Image: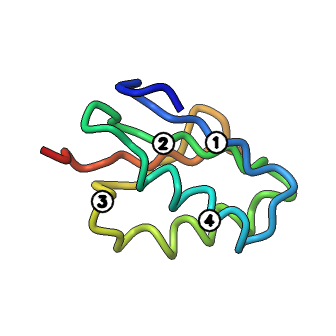
Amino acid sequence: MIQGQPFIQIDLHGMRKEEATRAIDKALAEASPFTYQIQLIHGYHRGTNLRSMIQDWYRLDARVKRIMPGDNPGITILVLKELY
């Protein structure tokens, strides 16, 4: 991850829920104060289970301001709260 980048993009294709959760949690932990969103690429047809998990698990996360769909139905975006 590059320090200070405004967004992080993670490709979750082929990951199980546990693997995806670890990858997302790592990105949240390593996000800089300048990172405002994490784009999660989970896929459309086979990624619906991951999309549901992301919405269920991260909607109450203190670091996440809101969850929104991407421009593509296979992408979910976590909009982060300001860290400073």
At 12% from the left edge and 44% from the top edge, which residue is drawn?
84
Quarter of the image for residue 54 reads bottom right
Q: In terms of secondary structure, where does tag 1 sit?
A: strand
Labels 1 and 4: the sequence-earlier one: 1
Q: In terms of secondary structure, where does tag 4 sit?
A: helix
Q: Position of residue 71 (x, y in %)?
A: 58, 32
Q: In terms of secondary structure, where does tag 3 sit?
A: loop
- The residue tagged 4 is 22
The CA span between labels 3 and 2 is: 11 Å
42 relative to 63, above or below: above
At label 2, which amino acid type do we have? Ile
At label 3, which amino acid type do we have? Arg
Left/right placement of residue 61 relative to residue 41 reads left
At label 4, which amino acid type do we have? Arg
Q: Position of residue 32 (x, y in %)?
A: 33, 38
Q: Residue 10 versus residue 31: which sits nearer the camera?
A: 31
Camera-near label (4 vs 3) is 4
Q: What number is the disc on residue 38?
A: 2
